[in-house]
Amino acid sequence: MNASTIRFVLPALVASIGLEHAVHADESDTVPRYITVIHCEPQESDESEWPSLVNMIKACEDRGIKACIQFSDEWIPFIVDNSARLDKIRSWRDWGHEISAHHHTLDHPSYWDGYSNDPDAADRHGYQGDMQDFRWLISSVLPANSRLTSISTFDDDMPAGIPFQVGGDGGPGPDMAVSIPTLKWLTQGPAWNLTTAALEQGGTWYSDILQTIFLKTPADSVFGIAIHPHAYHEGEEAEFDAWLDFLAAQDPGGTRSATPTEILTPYAFTAGDTNYDGTVDGSDLAMILAAWGTEDPHADLNADRIVDGSDLATVLANWTIDG
Ligand SMILES: [Zn+2]
């Protein structure tokens, strides 16, 4: 059985085991862990949105709340060449926020961002590349020595090499606010998922119903909302501030706030388990060697766009010891 066969046989195996995990909660925890995801939309990439994003994150920090800041492709050009903005991103990461990615697929109801793994996409007007191209573009604003670990995208456009998916197929309705880490086996491999509900959509705020849902969410589940910088334009901060104040009242200091990557990391496959069979062994070593010198995202474990000695070292360092 070769490596790619293994990759397609395993899903059935894993699906039959039913990998879903409740999140660890101490008995004293009554508040669920919660994620606050900021979608930086491709069709709202005007630079004038940047101050709204900055202010929104400051408002989260004032209450000790971590955010997951998700950039789409059209935000990258005015960040990547601006050292003050890159410094800001580094400071957000250092504070404890997550820098992540937001993708609009070909069939997005309002706006396609030009990237897709769909074979028909290359013929469509506005095509810019596949999802690996998208991944590297977004990665260009990450601080040095960090990698993109989560993305919001529909299932069929999940890039290989990113272990965590936020949102996914389906609408952003209030029913999406509560989830537990759930494994999806997608075309590119495994992805652990959490979902989010839109706090504001098309000018309508869902704060009241989402507050009710938050208060009913079990402590071993995850509560997630998504919001956009356009909801925090100057003079229009009251709704989101009120939402953050609600969270701060339930969770003083934001100790239950988390990033998707923090919550999902304990469930991720061991680094070096390139065929996702639960052990790091000779078959993983063979995959590294077969992909040597390439960009194969399944074997490029440290995401530096080349399969080389450092990826081999990761496999050896995580080698499964029998017994
Ligand atoms: Zn969006």
Image: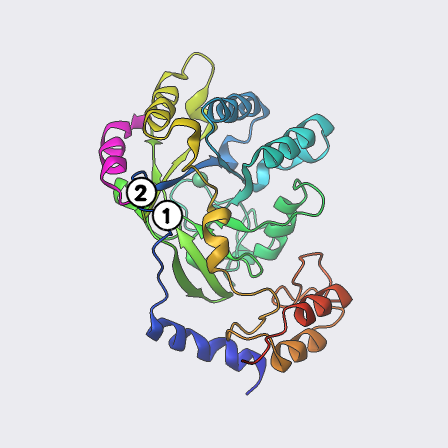
Amino acid tagged 2? Ala
The answer as to whether callout 1 falls within 8 Å of ligand 1 is: no
Q: Check disc 1 and report the residue beneath it.
A: 195
Residue 106 shows in the view: no
Residue at 50%, 47% (x, y): give it.
Answer: 262
Amino acid tagged 1? Thr
Q: Is residue 317 above or below residue 304?
A: below
Q: Check disc 2 and report the residue beneath it.
A: 177
Residue at 46%, 46% (x, y): give it.
Answer: 260
Ligand number 1: quarter of image: top left
Residue at 72%, 77% (x, y): give it.
Answer: 289
Q: Are marks 1 and 2 in contact (CB under 8 Å)?
A: yes
| Circle 1 SS class | loop
The residue segment tinted magenta is 203-219
Question: In this view of the protein, which residue sits in the foreground, 271 or 164?
Answer: 271
In reply to whether residue 218 is colored magenta, the answer given is yes
Residue at 43%, 37% (x, y): give it.
Answer: 257
